[in-house]
Amino acid sequence: MAQNPPAEPESTDDSGSADTDDTGNSTDEADSTGTDETGTAEPEPEPEPEPEPEPEPEGRVSARTGWVVAAFLLFWPLAVPALVQAVRAAREAAANHLDAARAASRRALGFAVGAICTGTVLLAGSAAAVVMAPAWLPAGAAAYVPPALAQAAGLVTASPERSGDAGAGTASAPSGAPDGTTDPFDVLPTPGTSAGEDIARWWATEGQETADDPSRTRPVDLDSGDCLDTEEVDGLAILYWIPVVPCDEPHHGEVFGVTWLEDSVGGGAPGATDGTGAAPTQAELWEAADAYCYPEFDEFVGEAWAASELTYWPVAPSQESWEEGDRKVACIVESDQPVTGTLEGAGR
């Protein structure tokens, strides 16, 4: 008899199926997990490298502009090559030729420093020369004194027309006075001597009247306190007379001191009164007059001469009148503006 084979238990199929499912599920989960961890993960982007900073220049090269400007102000001959080197330094620096630029800059500085030092020495020397110079300078020397230095030092420079006023002592003549072409006796009173006698001598020795006008006074007759109309004799080379006016009238000048020089100034015997002293040079006569008048000026005006706005000049003997016995010195103070009254204690 045929016998039916026994049926396989269902539990075995279920178990296998379950195992399969379980195994498959486990496998899928494992695969899924493995993929997430390794296969499907995207790599992070690498950071871009930062740009390197540009190299800074090794150092700035100066064109020495300030030094060059100062050099031109003080001594331009050396400032010119300094300017040339400064321009070259700027050009080389712009082309990034730093070594050449530095060399040109150093040369520009050297020229500029040399110009500044030279100009400073010359300026200081000029100032010292003005301060140490005498109160009066002849026109030729006065032309070389910078006006700013002369004003700061209180220097009085004589114009060519006034050079005789400052110390010749032969005083001044009116307009049309002797000039080499005009007969002096046509414009001055005849001194009672021969026409060829030197007029520079008779005013001090002959004692003649100078004019009918009583206001005209010879320089040797001036006294302290006399007020003078200096405008009338302004611009004359030699003074033979000078107008004396009342001090209550407008005037410009005033005699603030009178003295008589010793014979020793001229190399004669001290105290001699016979006029036999050897004649000094005109410069020595002016120096002797200044030695007396400067202190008198300070005391009379109330202001040191070097700081005063007033002008001082002396009337001293000439070499010719000294030989005739003239020893008188008159100190005169003058104002640019008309004055009524005295300049004593003016303080300016």
Image (cartoon, helix red, strand yellow):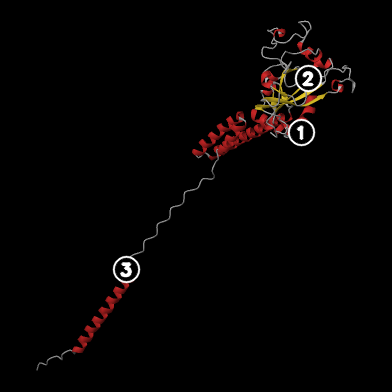
**Amino acid type of the residue tagged 3 in the rendering:** Gly
Q: Earlier in the sequence, mark 3 or mark 2?
A: 3
Which of the two discs, 3 and 1, labels the residue nearer the N terminus?
3
- Find out whether the residues at labels 1 and 2 contact each other: C-beta distance under 8 Å: no
Q: Measured from the top left, where is residue 53 in percent x and y? A: 46, 51
Residue 30 screen position, x and y as percent: 30, 76
Q: Tell me residue 131's x, y (percent).
A: 72, 31
Q: Quadrant of the C terminus?
A: top right
Q: Inspect the image, locate mark 1, and give the three-letter code of the amino acid beneath it.
A: Glu
Dot 3: element: helix
Task: In the rendered view, tell whether residue 187 sits above or below residue 246.
Answer: above
Instruction: Tell me the residue that label 3 is attached to.
Output: 39
- The part of the image, by quadrant, that contains residue 338 is top right
Q: In what element is the residue under mark 2?
A: helix
**Mark 1 vs mark 2: in front:** 2
**Where does the image place residue 258, in percent across and percent down from the top left?**
79, 25
Residue where numbered disc 2 is placed: 221
Name the residue located 33 percent from the left edge and 65 percent from the top edge. 42
Q: In terms of secondary structure, where does tag 1 sit?
A: helix
Q: Which mark is nearer the camera, 3 or 1?
A: 1
The amino acid type, in three-letter code, at marker 2 is Asp
Q: Quadrant of the N terminus?
A: bottom left
Is residue 160 something that shows in the picture? no
Residue 299's label in the rendered image is 1
Whether residue 295 is visible: yes
Residue occupying the point 25% across, 83% down: 19
Q: Is residue 3 left or right of residue 328?
A: left
Q: Out of 281 and 79, give the one closest to the viewer.
A: 281
Of marks 3 and 2, the one in the foreground = 2
Seen from the viewer's position, the closer of residues 108 and 149 is: 149
